[in-house]
Image: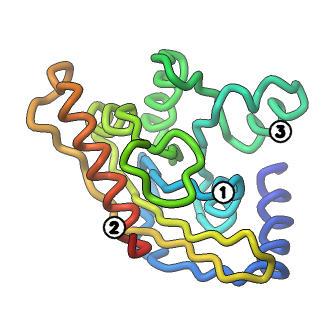
Amino acid sequence: MLYKIGKFLFYIYFSLFRRVKVEGMENVPKEGPLLLYANHPSAWDMILIGVYMKRKVHYMAKAELFRNPFLAWLFRSLGAFPVNRGKGDVGSIKTVFRLLEEGKVVGIFPEGTRTPKKDPRKRKMGAALLAARSKAPVLPVGVVWSKKIFSRVRLVFGKPFIVQPEKEGEHTGKDELMNITSDIIDRIYALIGQ
């Protein structure tokens, strides 16, 4: 209920104060497990994607956002779950696999933090690890955001693909995982011409 109300209110906000152009909506699978990977130029990205996606997105969000009890309740109500960045968070990884097994959409920013433009130094191999191990389709999403009110915002959904590492399962090496993450990020930025 809260999710639907929030989605409606933010849709009104975007309609009044932003000129959102959505492209590639036909690429979003209507059902089944899905890893949604997007670039992260602003704090609004989770909300923007969530408003225009027809399916609910369960975001992996930094644990710091869950320190305040009210915000923790709000984020969990909206489908988000915490991840401790910078260390292997087994609990959040288990949550991702459980959600995918239930046929849900999990949203992750593979750069790990807000990044105004493409930065080769910002890429987390966890994105590749989750995609390689789960075999869930990856949906690349590109966001073009401007801080100026009434400015054009672009939201581009690419075609889903399956990550297929050279070596399956536990044997996928660190270098290969970083290469896969780089490929995912390159696909995202290609959608918005970067």
Seen as rendered, the residue at the extreme right is 70
Disc 1 secondary structure class? loop
* Gap between marks 2 and 1 measured at Cα: 23 Å
Q: 32 and 124: which one is in front?
A: 124
User: Which residue type carries mark 3?
Assistant: Leu
Q: Residue at x 43, y 47 (%)?
A: 35
* Gap between marks 3 and 1 measured at Cα: 19 Å
Judging by the rendered image, the residue that carries numbered circle 3 is 74
Sequence-first disc among 3 and 1: 1
Q: Residues within 10 Å of mark 3 (few under 14, many from 20)?
A: some
Q: Quadrant of residue 24?
A: bottom left
Along the horizontal axis of the image, is 9 left or right of 180?
Answer: right
Image coords of residue 18 (percent x, y): 75, 79
Question: If the image is split into quadrants, where does the C terminus sit?
Answer: bottom left
From the viewer's perspective, is residue 48 above or below residue 24?
above
Q: Residues within 10 Å of mark 1 (few under 14, many from 20)?
A: some
Q: Residue at x 25, y 50 (%)?
A: 162
Image coords of residue 115 (percent x, y): 55, 52
Q: 150 and 166: which one is in front?
A: 150
Judging by the rendered image, the residue that carries numbered circle 1 is 42
Q: Which mark is residue 159?
A: 2
User: Which residue type carries mark 2?
Assistant: Lys
Sequence-first disc among 2 and 1: 1
Disc 2 secondary structure class? loop
